[in-house]
Every structure is written in C-alpha cells, then in structure tokens.
Image (cartoon, coloured by chain):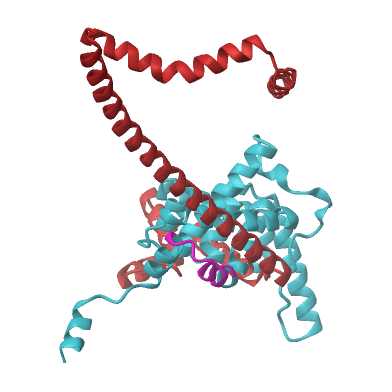
Amino acid sequence: MTNQEHERAIDIITRQGVDDIAAHDTAWLESHLAQCSECAEYAALVASTGQLLRAVAVTASPALVSTTQARVRARAAQLREHQARVVLIAVSFCIGVLSSTVSAWLWWRVGGWVAEHVGLPPSYVAPGILLFWLLPAIVIAVLMLAFPHHGLEQSLMLSLAREREGENR
Amino acid sequence: MVATAFSSLVPMETEEAQIARGLRRRDPDLLDVLIEQYQHRLLRYLLHLTGNRATAEDLFQETWLRVLEKGHLYDGRNRFVTWLMSIAHNVAIDHLRKRNPSSLDKMKDPEDGVPFEPEASGPSPLDLAVARQQHEMFDAALSQVPPLFREVLVLRFQEQMKLEEIAKLIRIPVATVKTRIYRGVMALRPALKGNAQ
C-alpha cells in the first residue's frame, strides 16, 4: 500500500460527516479500511472523538447572556453617541474651513481696496493682513508674558509632571 | 401577476445578508437574538480553547463587544458562525498575548478542576457511571492536547465545520488543518482506546 493511498484515506475519514463524499470515494475507503489496520484504527478514533466531543454539554448561564446583552447595548449606545459627535465635529470643521476661506478672500479684497485708497504699494497687502490676523494672538502673548498667571503655570507644570510619570511607567 | 414575476426575479435575502445588514446598523435587537442563538456554541468553543470557565466567560462578552464594533466587516458571504468563531479566536489570541506569550496551555487554571460537566448518557446507573468515567478520562485527555490541535478538534467535531471553513477561520492552509486534526486525534488515542474498540 502506498503513502498516497493512506493520505487519501485519512483525507476522506477527516472529511466524513461534514463534507459530501462521493460514492466511489466511500466505496474505495471501505475496501481500503478492510485491508489497512492503521487507517481503520484512525477511522475508529475519529468516530470516538466526534462522539465524545458532541456529548460534552456546555451551557451559558442566563446571567452571562443577560450581562453580555446589557454590555453590548450600552456599548452600542456609546458608539452611536460617538458617531454623532464625530459627524458634528466634521460638519463644524467643514463650516469653519468654508467661512475661513470666504473671510480670507473678503479681507484680501478689503486690504487691496484700503491699500489702493491710502496709496500703499500692493506688496504691503499680504503682510498687512497677516499682521491683522496675528495681532490678537500677539497681544495676548505679550499680556501673558507681562502679567504671568501662577495658576496657569502651575497646571501646565502639573500636566507635564503627569506626562513624565506616565512615560516612566 | 407582475408582483409574482418580480419576486421570482429578485433573489430572497439570505439570513447571512440580513445579519450583515443588521450588524452594519449596529442593531441591538439583532445582537440580542444572535447572543441568545449562539451562546452555547461560542462558550463551548472558548471553554475548550482556554480550559477555564471564568476566562471563557470574559472572552465571551469581549467577543460580542467586538462583533458590535467590527460588525461592518462581515459581508454576509460566509456563514455567520464561521465569522463569529474567527472573532472569538482573535479575542482569545489577544488575551493569550497579553497574559502569556509563550503558551495557550498556561491559560488553564490548575485549580479549576474538571472544566465542563459531561452530559449523562445511558439508561442504567452502571452505563451512566461508565459513560461519566469515559467522559472524565476524555476531558482530562483533551485538556492535555496542545491548544492548536484542541481548537481544530472542537471546530471539526463539535461545531461540524468543514476543513475549508476551519482553514479560513484560523488562517492556515487546509493541509495544516488536516495535519492538526490527525495529530490531535492521535494525541487522544490513549484515552480513546477503550471507547474505539
């Protein structure tokens, strides 16, 4: 008997019960098992394994099922809320980009118009608008440097310390 | 008449397609039904995989949470149970990696005792006792089988899955599935000897 025949027999035995086995394969297996004690033993072991594994009864408790259902429901609600928030953020972002673009264009036109009426060269328009936009941030930064806020500094230091602690862990 | 002709042209939506649609919507009612429907099969698979009831119950809940989160990835082309078991397989692997990267067998709690109750069979008390003893021996032998082989044995013989389904689920070639089944059965040979004769 060749190795190929044993392999074919093992393949059919392994597939029996779940796969559709052709009639000629079943007939061939039967004749092979009649001659090969090794494969016949494997067939018997496979049958016993299946029989014993199917006889093992495992049941989930009703408490486990209801807890799982409750957790899944809670998580589903959480995910829905998160999704709604993401949509809201995306919409806000789009509106922000759109309004920034429109206002930038308007300011550009206004800057050009002012420069034309005041008699400034057009090369002053771009830096002028940039300065106009950055002015509030510059003013706030100067004020913060001039009058340091201890509470703010403390909270910054605390958050930095926490971050470092997390890294060390 | 037209309606009948139309309905015969439009294919009926399969159960898998309905599940896929519900999972994409994260329908909690559908998930309730699925949890009820697959509770025993999923727990049994996880229990065999981990050998520990408490761990299996934790992973059971984790699996359903992941089904909810990854539900949009199920396309409805394969059986839902195969996809569910593959999620459970991944959850168990992740758990194993967190706990002990060396071996799945380490997950078995030695103080856990006999992991599952064998179903009593046989009409007489003697038959019952013999069957119980056989099951206990089998359970003990099964728990000694490496988890790689134990998993395919459970999927093949308990879940009645085709070799191709198991291969897809565990992401290994069909030939490897066959080898693992063979080696798993052979590992059980000492415990099965009495039963096979």
Q: Nearer the viewer, residue B94 or A84?
A: A84
- The answer to whether residue B57 is left or right of residue A87 is right
User: How many marks can you see?
Assistant: 0
**Which image quadrant for residue B93?**
top right
Residue sitting at 73 percent across and 73 percent down? Answer: B131
In the rendered image of this protein, which colour is used for chain B? cyan
A33 shown above or below A88: below
Residue A22 is situated, as x and y percent measured from the top left of the image, at: 32, 70
Region rendered in magenta:
B24-35
Residue B113 is situated, as x and y percent measured from the top left of the image, at: 82, 57
A119 shown above or below A158: above
Q: Nearer the viewer, residue A9 or A145?
A: A145
Q: Residue B65: within the magenta?
A: no
Specify the chain shown as red.
A
Residue A49 is situated, as x and y percent measured from the top left of the image, at: 59, 64
Residue B43 is situated, as x and y percent measured from the top left of the image, at: 64, 62
